[in-house]
Image: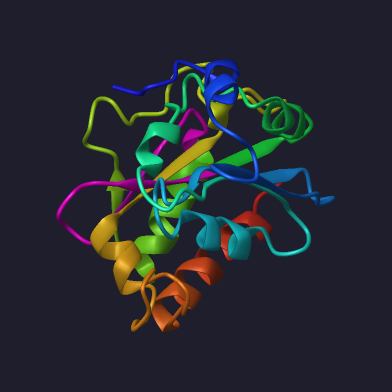
Amino acid sequence: MDKYLNYSELKKNETEGRDYCIHLRRGQSGVAIVAPHGGGIERGTRQIADAIAGTEHTYYCFEGIKEKGNQVLHITSDHFDEPLCLAEVGHSIKVITIHGAGAEEAAVYAGGLDDELKHNILLALSSAGFMAGSDPSPTRQGNGMTNICNRGSSGKGVQLELTGRLRRRMFDPPDADGYRHPNELFVSFIQTIRYVISATQV
């Protein structure tokens, strides 16, 4: 269970710049790449979302920066309502959110209401050698209308859940954080998602 139901509750108890920070880089493509649980909340998702967005797509990340205990900053996607994120996502046609999942296998699972984009991403990832499929967890389907991935102007988006094992394999140690040195697997994942986006009519 999340400690905070929404951003308003979180903001009353946590300090921006000390406990969390917000990253935003606006693009012009009509696509937004969002990591609502970056930093110490779901490690590696900030770097992945940032790289997918590049310079042409909008990039947003809510990043936990506490020394420890960042899980208290997790707001479930159906309730994630940080105002800056809502504004930017609302101006976007396509939204892809990047999350961390706790499954044992090295895999990426897709949810969300944009069935066509979801299908194309899963097909491309599978072709690139990734274990990819629809999310088997009933709590990670991303089908809620208030889910942040579905709050773009089209009303449908894609939620990508990358397991911890996959995220760890995308970065080379050694360092204390473990997510500072992207490797070839990281590059392959980023290039695959960016290719699908570039081939998608927005």
Q: Is residue 93 above or below residue 6?
A: below
Q: Is residue 108 magenta?
A: yes
**Residue found 56% across the figure and 34% down from its top:** 157
Position of residue 40 in the picture relative to residue 96 (left or right): left
On the question of residue 199 being in view, the answer is no
Q: Quadrant of the C terminus?
A: top right
Q: Is residue 168 magenta?
A: no
Position of residue 92 in the picture relative to residue 134 (left or right): right
- 122 vs 101, nearest the viewer: 101
Magenta range is 97-115
Q: Position of residue 193 (x, y in %)?
A: 53, 60
Q: Quadrant of the N terminus?
A: top left
Q: Position of residue 168 (x, y in %)?
A: 31, 68
Q: Position of residue 149 (x, y in %)?
A: 55, 32
On the question of residue 85 being in view, the answer is yes
**Residue found 46% across the figure and 43% down from its top:** 118
Q: Position of residue 77 (x, y in %)?
A: 46, 28
